Amino acid sequence: MTATGATASPRRRWRVSEETRWAFIFLLPWIIGFLIFTAGPMIASLYLSFTDYNVIRPPDPVGLENYEQLMRDRRIPLSLVNTAVYAGLNVPATIIISLALAMLLLRVGRAAGFFRNVFYLPNLTPAVAVGTLYLLLLSGNGLLNRIIGVFGIDGPNWLTDPSWAKQGIVIMSLWTLGSTVIIYFAALKNVPVELYEAAKIDGASAWQQFRNITVPFISGALFFTLIVNTIASLQIFAEVFTMFFTTRSGPAQDSALFYTIYLFQKAFQDLDMGYASAMAWLLFVIILVITLIQVRLSRRFVYYAGEGG
Amino acid sequence: MWAKANGVDLLSEDGLTSQLDDPAVAEALQYATSLITAHGEGPAFFDFRANGPGGVDFFGPDNQFAADTLGAMPMEQWYLNVLASNSPDEEISFVPFKDRQGNNISLSGGSAWAIPASADNKEAACEFMRVVTLPDTWFAAAQVRAEQRAADGEPFTGVYTGNTEADERIFGELVTEESAGAYYEGAQLVQEVADQSFALPPTPAAEEFTRIWQAAVNAVINEGADPTEALAQADREAQDAIDAAQ
């Protein structure tokens, strides 16, 4: 009896419902893709980060040498600061402008569907095409400078002046804020209208309504887009590479040297895959820490309707 | 080129020691920068070069020479072929780059063949390399291009082979006043200065070395950095890169 009981217990533990089994079957394509194309390369890059590997010869283990070199390399802090400045400008700009556009969308009634599409369409443009487009728009005599020239402002050289390169890249990035607008628009539609009506009766101003009703109710969406846009900003690559790095030398390259671009240069131009792998893991840790801080802070500021708080 | 004209090389002969901190390099950079800043600030100059009239169509018929926005520029010889195709009748003069003593200098580079150690058929690869770089092969290829250019009504400015015998035959027989037209003088000049050329020695960190010294040059031209300090910093980075790549 005892023996039978002992063997029956583990079996019971492994029993899965048919529903769960089907769920895993449907998830299988993603799981396989994740293991082969994400988890596999991640593990490989972790190993390579402790080696000297130039693609041609087999990896040669070097211990922590790549990580020590990270501490000495002047271009690591340079590229990290460039990336942080860009993210610091881009994330708030994307959030504020997207929220403003989403609130405008709420007021246009039936036309909202049309504008939603218009705002989202630029997201479908390939990154390299966006970079090329902005080479034309941001050049000294490009459309942007001509527009601000109408107001008597002499526009800067966005593409060649190191002090304006990052601002130019932020303007380029706003091209794809459509997805954030759509998320805010959906969140705004879920804010109960009765609250605004009650607030109006109580004499609340538009700002008070926005501050005390709108923002708390869409804080989940704000938090989500904060995290997603922060990660995207820290990983931006293709557009910036197209704009500033298609030639070997460019006048504003040091200012536009973002971390992922330096990582690409080390990996695919210098063929220093071991060092590039170490760089990738440093970026992973940085993004992880930033995201954890954001998650921790969110507990104080984010309100989820389902929690009954 | 500017450093060489000032009598100094960026790298030691064995390619293992950076010489970017040589005062003569800083002096050359200071001089080259002054040629740019004489036109205004660096960023405005570079924007005009890339996006001004003719700049956008650098490889096309509306180039800066056709748009009359460029008086002179130091340029590699391949651009002569681009111009010959796009602006066949443009009147352009060509002069050699000279050092401070007045001697012609020219920088040469090129591509190399390589056979992977694990290749299945190394002998065939070797034979392929040998045959396609024979003077007769070069000449035959140049002849086809010359005929094509003639059929298209464009000047034929030669083919750069890196093979003395092939060059002599191509530039002696195929590049003529008739076939090269307005570009005859330029095409012959490229050949003449080939004898006075120098090459940067191979270095284990070639890509990084170039990127590092060019970043220093950009900092001086665009951000007003001090040439001596920028190059000293670049020298340290370049030496680290070379040492790490060995």
Image (cartoon, helix red, strand yellow):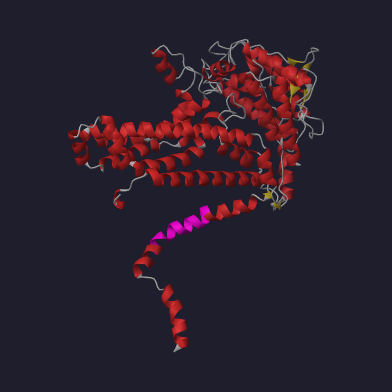
Frontmost residue, A167 versus B32: A167
Side (left or right) of A189 relative to A252? left
Rendered position, A160 above or below A285: above
Q: Quadrant of the C terminus of chain B?
A: top right
Count of numbered tags: 0
Frontmost residue, B148 versus A192: A192
Frontmost residue, A155 versus A5: A5
Whole-percent x and y of residue B48? 54, 16
Rendered position, B56 above or below A181: above
Residue name at image x 55 percent, y 46 percent: A284
Residue name at image x 51 percent, y 28 percent: A166
Q: What secondary structure is the magenta-colored segment mainly? A: helix
Q: Which residues are magenta?
A: A25-38
Image quarter of residue A28: bottom left
Side (left or right) of B16 relative to B120? right
Q: Is residue A32 magenta?
A: yes
Side (left or right) of B125 relative to A199? right
Side (left or right) of B47 relative to A75? left
Whole-percent x and y of residue B205? 72, 37
Q: Is there any visible trace of residue A273 in the rendered image?
A: yes
Whole-percent x and y of residue B82? 60, 22
Image quarter of residue B84: top right
Residue name at image x 20 percent, y 31 percent: A203
Q: Is residue A7 magenta?
A: no
Whole-percent x and y of residue A81? 56, 33
Q: Is there any visible trace of residue B178 in the rendered image?
A: no
